[in-house]
Image (cartoon, grey):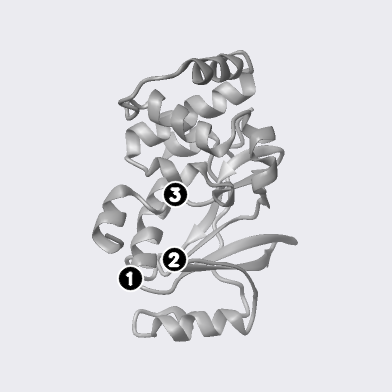
Amino acid sequence: MKINELLSEAPLPDDWDKEAYKADKSFASRIRYAQERAKKIGTGSSRIAFEIEYQGRPTVLKIAKNKKGLAQNDYESQMFNDHYVTGLGITIPMIDHDEENDPPVWIHTEKAERIHANSFKKVFGLDPHTFQRYIEWATGQNRYGLNEKDEELFNVIVNDEDKYELLHDLTDLVGNYGLPIGDFARAANWGMYKGHPVLLDVGLTTEVFDLHYS
């Protein structure tokens, strides 16, 4: 079952001063403004995620805290607007993104329930290491081929329609958009939205990584 759906656009919360996110404001001041008004639910090296209420439900606002975060917001907003990507139904739906600044300072998405490391295999049918090997093999990036144990595990997945469809769609996503496979073998990058696993972060491409992280 796909979860692609039409979502109406919405700006930052009505009671937030939009001037706080203008291009002339510092990264630190933007983050500080959000911290005073919303609950921080996640932080990384480039972006911080806050929970904000939208139409009576909790949603997520991801704010860049440096140039790396801007680059990730830029690519992620494009991905979340891509009809092919959203049609796969394996990414968290985007509600809106910053159109006042280029690249965007923030991205607003639906909120998913986190998938924990100890439940990864239950959701995907494979442990994280084997899951990564499957994607590498399916995208032609596994130069060592498959061992007998791998083949047995993958055959089990092929016979599970839901799990196979998920892995097939993820393989398409990785193969067509050059996304780092290792990112998708981490439980922290997945969530459950309306009963289905979805990617929470697709902003770190190999290009963004090479330019800002290497």
* Front position among marks 2 and 1: 1
Q: Is residue 120 left or right of residue 202?
A: right
The mark that comes first in sequence, 3 or 2, is 2
> Quadrant of the rendered structure where residue 72 is?
bottom left
Numbered label tally:
3
- Identify which amino acid the numbered label 3 is placed on: Val
Q: Is residue 200 left or right of residue 23?
A: right
Q: How busy is the neighbourhood of tag 3: few (under 14 within 10 Å), some, or many (20 plus)?
A: many
Question: Which residue is at 31% across, 55% downward?
Answer: 209
Q: Which quadrant of the rendered structure holds the N terminus?
A: top right
Question: Which residue is at 55% across, 23% downward?
Answer: 165
Return the residue nearer the eye: 181 or 146: 146
- What residue is disc 2 on? 98
Q: How busy is the neighbourhood of tag 2: few (under 14 within 10 Å), some, or many (20 plus)?
A: many
The mark that comes first in sequence, 3 or 1, is 1
Return the x and y of residue 8 as percentages of the image width and height. Answer: 58, 53
- What residue is disc 3 on? 202
The numbered dot on residue 67 is: 1
Q: Which quadrant of the rendered structure holds the C terminus?
A: bottom left
The numbered dot on residue 205 is: none
